[in-house]
Each structure stands twice: as C-alpha cells, then as structure tokens.
C-alpha cells in the first residue's frame, strides 16, 4: 500500500495532464521532469563535483528537450550539437579540478541522450495524430508492466533475471509484467483507439514491455556503478524521478518511430 497509493496518484495526475492539459503544459511537465531526472543523474555520476558544476551540466543537457517545442526539425538536431559542445566546453573549463575528464565527458553525453533526448520523444509523440491516445497506451504498458512485475515477482519470483544488475528482479516478475503491461495496453487502446486492431496492439505491447524492462535495468546499471540504491527520495516509496521514468526513456523513442514511419495506424 505504501508503494501502491503514491504510484496511483502519480499515474492519475499524469493521465489527467495528458487528457485535459494543453500541449504547452505537457512540454513544461516533460522539461521539469527532465531537469529533476538530470539532477539525480549527475548527483550519482558526478558525486565529487561541486554542486554548481552539476547544475551547469544539467542546463547543458536540457537543451534538446527545451528545443523540441520548436516546430522546425533541424532545431532539434542543432540542440544536440549545442549540448555536445556545451559538455566539451564545461569539461575543458573544469579539467584541472576533475579526477577523470573522460568520465565527465562520457557521462554528460550519456545524460543528454539517455534522459533529455529520449524524454523529448514523448513531446514528439503528442504532436502526432492520436498522439495523446498513444501516450496513454504507452503509459499503460509501462505502469501496468511495472506493477505486474513488482507484485508477481514478490509472490511468485524464484529465478533471478539479472542478479548482478538488479538482484530483486526475477524471471517470473518479468513475465508477469509483460502480461500485465500487454493487457493494460489492449484495454487502454480499446477505449482511446477503438478502431485499432487488438492483435496489432498486442504485437506492439510485448516488445514495448521488453524495452521497458531494458530501460529499468539500464538505470540499475547506472545506480549500481555509482553506488546508489535509488536515484533520489523525492517520490516517497518510489525513490527518485529517474526511478519512475526509466521505463519511458527507452520505450518513448521506440513508439515514436513506429508511429512516425507508419508501422502503426
């Protein structure tokens, strides 16, 4: 219950903003989420760096998700170059005070791509036809999969999925998450995409569930390498912001390109 209630409230607020909020409000939400996620990420990866320098890296990494609000596609690509140049200049400026300049350069580039760039694709999905409906399906996949994996893993979990990365995750939990995420996606599509083919939704939901697990494990690699259990404490029993959005970071771009290239109606 300690985990379920806050999770239900966060999901309800997210869905409310998706359905009733404007495109600008959604973009602001994603920008704020990216800023908090980047702050947690740099707190883990740049633990020994001065606080001001971490905020400078956060600012530089935010550029792609800030630029996605602009209608010109080339501005989005230019934003990536600006972030790369910004990271390079910051590392050059701070190099004398850094123990390993290459570590800072690589981590800042990863933070830009993994958090800011990937989150920007959620904004891009919203601009597509029926984009809100597809974001609701994506939410159903990740939230349903995460909930199913957690409770099935707790009750039936025996075999470890990736014991060296995330000891708590089990094969049974992953299977339960895939089933729950797929069923939630089909149910959501039935309501918000009534003309969609349920078998096509299922065919998309299963790999999205797998990518959702991969996104979760990717964040676990970062936390384990940095020596952290949770990315933060902001969300009570759910850890930090990055702990809650890790599944969306990988699945968002995958769904966007499936829609963009016409592989989904």
Image (cartoon, rainbow, N blue to C red):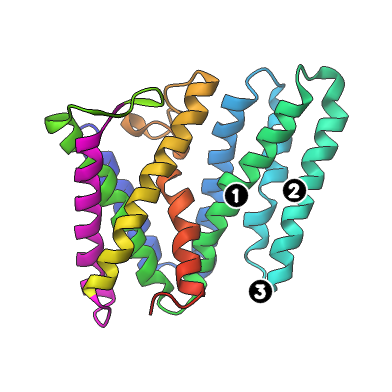
Mark 1 Cα within 10 Å, few/some/many (few <14, many 20+)?
many
Identify the image quadrant of residue 204: bottom left
In primary-sequence order, the first of circles 1 and 3 is: 3
Do residues under tags 1 and 2 come within 8 Å of each other at their CB atoms? Answer: yes
176 magenta-colored? yes
Can the viewer see residue 13 in this picture?
no
| Distance CA(mark 2)–CA(mark 3) | 19 Å
Q: In which quarter of the image is the C terminus?
A: bottom left
User: Which residue is label 1 attached to?
Assistant: 116
Question: Outermost residue toward the bottom?
Answer: 195
| Distance CA(mark 1)–CA(mark 2) | 10 Å
Residue lying at 78% horizontally and 25% vertically, measured from the top left: 101
Residue lying at 55% horizontally and 53% vertically, measured from the top left: 118
Image location of residue 79, percent across then percent down: 73, 57
Q: Quadrant of the N terminus?
A: top left
User: Which residue is label 3 attached to?
Assistant: 71
In primary-sequence order, the first of circles 1 and 2 is: 2
Image location of residue 171, percent across then percent down: 24, 35
Do residues under tags 2 and 3 come within 8 Å of each other at their CB atoms? Answer: no
5 magenta-colored? no
Image location of residue 200, percent across then percent down: 28, 72
In the picture shown, does residue 114 fall above or below 13?
above
Secondary structure category for the residue under label 3: loop
Secondary structure category for the residue under label 2: helix
User: Which residue is label 2 attached to?
Assistant: 83
Secondary structure category for the residue under label 1: helix
């Amino acid at each position: 219950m300690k985990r379920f209630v806050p999770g239900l409230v966060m999901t309800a607020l997210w869905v409310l903003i998706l359905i009733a909020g404007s495109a600008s409000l959604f973009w602001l939400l994603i920008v704020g989420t990216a800023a908090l996620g980047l702050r947690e990420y740099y707190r883990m990866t740049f633990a020994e760096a001065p606080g001001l320098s971490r905020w400078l890296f956060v600012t530089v990494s935010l550029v792609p998700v800030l630029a996605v609000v602009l209608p010109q596609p080339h501005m989005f690509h230019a934003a990536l170059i600006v972030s790369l140049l910004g990271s390079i200049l910051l590392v050059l400026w701070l190099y004398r005070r850094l123990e390993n300049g290459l570590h800072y350069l690589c981590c800042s580039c990863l933070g830009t791509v993994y958090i800011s760039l990937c989150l920007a694709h959620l904004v891009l999905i919203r601009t597509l036809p029926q984009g809100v409906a597809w974001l609701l399906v994506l939410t159903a996949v990740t939230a349903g999969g995460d909930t199913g994996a957690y409770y099935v893993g707790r009750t039936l979990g025996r075999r470890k999925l990736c014991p060296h990365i995330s000891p708590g995750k089990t094969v049974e939990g992953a299977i339960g998450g895939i089933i729950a995420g797929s069923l939630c996606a089909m149910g959501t599509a039935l309501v918000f995409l009534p003309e969609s083919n349920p078998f096509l939704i299922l065919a998309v939901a299963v790999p999205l569930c797998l990518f959702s697990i991969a996104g979760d494990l990717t964040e676990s690699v970062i936390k384990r390498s940095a020596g952290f259990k949770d990315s933060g404490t902001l969300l009570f029993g759910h850890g930090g912001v990055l702990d809650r959005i890790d599944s969306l970071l990988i699945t968002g771009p995958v769904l966007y390109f499936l829609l963009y290239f016409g592989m989904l109606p």
